[in-house]
Image (cartoon, rainbow, N blue to C red):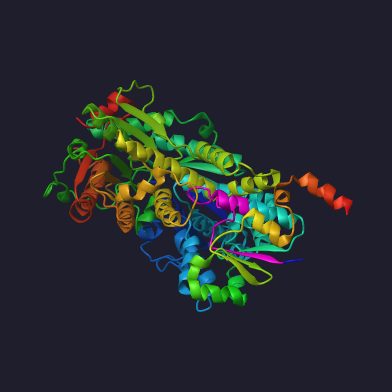
Amino acid sequence: MKKVEIFDPAMCCSTGVCGPGVDPELTRVASAVYSLEQKKFDITRYNLANDPGAFVENEVVNQVLLEKGPDALPLILVNNEVVKVGAYPTNEELAEWLDVKAAELQEKPRVRVSLKLDK
Amino acid sequence: MYPMFNPNQIALTPFLFFTGKGGVGKTSTACATAVFLADQGKKVLLVSTDPASNLQDVLDVELSNEPVAIPSVSNLFACNIDPEASARRYREQVVGLYRGKLPDAVLATMEEQLSGACTVEIAAFDEFSHLLSDEDVLNQYDHVLFDTAPTGHTLRLLQLPTAWTGFLEESTHGASCLGPLSGLGEKKELYAKAVESLSNIEKTTLILVSRPDVSSLVEANRASSELKDIGIQNQILIINGLLQTHRPEDGVSTAFYNRQRLALKETPDALKQVVTFSLPYVAYSLTGVDNLRHLFGSYTITVFEDDNLNAEPIQLPGLNKVIDDFSSKNIRVIFTMGKGGVGKTSIASAIAVGLSEKGHRVHLTTTDPAAHIAYTFEGSVLRDNLTISSIDPEIEVEKYKQEVLSTAGEGLDEEGLAYLKEDLESPCTEEIALFRAFAEVVDKSENEIVVIDTAPTGHTLLLLDSTEAYHKEMSRSTGDVPESVKKLLPRLQNPEETGVVIVTLAEATPVLEASRLQEDLKRAQIDPKWWVINQSLYATDTTDPILKGRAVSEKRWIKVVNEELAPQCAVIPWLHEEKIGYNKLKEFIL
């Protein structure tokens, strides 16, 4: 399975409701990631404000930050290779990387439960 | 009428909290109690949790967040929990680890995020709960006294444990706003202990401090019932500054005395259930250890320098000059600022009434959670060109949540919605919601003059701080930022649009307090235009020895304000009655 990592800029919270206005893009990403996590996909978010260690330990990320500074965030890695710089992935991109249908990212929880039982 | 307060008369718990509207004398009462207990050989720690504390002014010692021994009183230790400083320390702790490992520009974005209002709140609460749950503190000290912040802030601070305990339990994913606090598991236990200590009558006593005036009694009643609701049952009330006698032939003295007695008669019923004590009105100021010792000795007068009163009298204009000035310069946004209890609401109301009398369209509002405006205008019929509103934190939070859920929540599934709702439960939502409401009101100034009676100092500072933090953040956010929010800070900084009035009393603490507020405003590039010295006994002709004693000590502070602090200064004499209702408020400006 592919590994997707999202390195967020420094944020108070990952849905962005703590800003002066809510960024719908952030809430979309938050809920897509949450949905994928529930399905046991290997997807992780790191927030610079509370997980700066991840930005140091990952050499690829560290290198990009040294070259481009904070504007490179959000930075997206798939299997530790940079796939997107300075923007969040669309649901279609996430679906492609992880080989799921984009529509599945918006499915209701109980659908997921029944899928699991089918396995 | 009430027994004189003496710490020996109450069952002394390890934790003693002093609370009440700003300016009622919480700090001096707490200090006097601490000195009294220390003099009896008890080991005492005095803690201030006020973001704008005056503990060091009263004790005349430089304080930090670590307890220091007070040189002039053995057994007494004091510290000042400054949430801003705690947040700074926390920030350095987090960011410092990565200095040199991440580029400076990246570190700067981290620091900026960690400067938000919620980091400050978290840092303050964190320190606070350490003291409440640390066994060592209890082993080391017989009593820990908290000189708490003005009520609005106090309530939030004290309500935090319950709010957070619930929040931690319900938090199912991600750290959200608690992110900056790593290791939530250990904190949870700490916070649970803090909550337990607060609601344990064996451990905690809440000492409500009130002046014998209607608004501070109403406030004490509110605090009493609200804190009772969150489990703090063990409460006593101190009526501070009660005039013992009066001179029948002296108008001011008689009115002063009668007004106090009348206010006490109207004590809210619920508050009457609380065991009540009194402390006398004294001619001297309650700063310095010697004067603090006099308080429980019931000395009302010390040295009285009569000569100073009549030498070189100070002449200052009244509030009407302030109103004339704003009216002629066409100022659109007017703030009255100052510590709680100095009469910001009355002054804001009087300015609004004065401007509307001059034919301007005026809107008056309050961001003070205690919302005194409804009380100030009780039973009045208003002119057509004057409207009034208040910003209620609870309503604003609800409105904000609904707005977010209806815009950002669109297209999300159940899980996504649950996630969003979770983040909206975080404590900083309130800050944002209030802030936006504030911006909306100021936005009205395009069509009418807006007069705002801001919340007590600590809260105000946080609000203004938020203003700037949000402005920085906006340049990055792609979210939908209301136009009113974008325009706010530049407007506040424009002297042709905005007028800030600092309201103070001619006493040491309020003046020092107000000068710090002015400094803070200047840091945000906001220059106050006027200072108003309210409730001045110096501006009356009293002959009552105690009141005259106060008038003498006032003179020094009026001079300081007029000569060193205020660009322009007005004074309002102590008035025979509280100005409630439109027509009474008009008398302010005659």
* Residue B251 visible in image: yes
Q: Is residue B353 left or right of residue B487?
A: left
Quarter of the figure with the C terminus of chain B: top left
Residue A48 is left or right of residue B570, and the answer is: right
Is residue B200 shown to the viewer in this render?
no
User: x, y (%) of residue B2?
Assistant: 45, 37
Residue toward you, A38 or B296 = A38
Q: Which residues are magenta?
A: A3-29
Which residue is at the front of the view, B489 or B552? B489
Horizontal side of B260 relative to B194 (left or right) equals left
Q: Residue at x 39, y 49 (%)?
A: B457
Residue at the farthest bottom position: B100
Q: Quadrant of the N terminus of chain B?
A: top left
Q: Is residue B507 left or right of residue B183?
A: left
In the rendered image, residue A9 lying in the magenta stretch gets the answer yes
Give the answer, above or below, for where B63 lies relative to B229. Answer: below
Q: What percent of the width, then of the height, locates residue B244?
A: 35, 38
Picture coordinates of residue B419, whole percent (x, y) = 65, 49
At 50% across and 61% down in the image, what residue appears? B113
Q: Quadrant of residue A76?
A: bottom right
Q: Nearer the viewer, residue B157 or B506?
A: B157
Quadrant in the picture for residue B572: top left
x, y (%) of residue B280? Answer: 38, 43
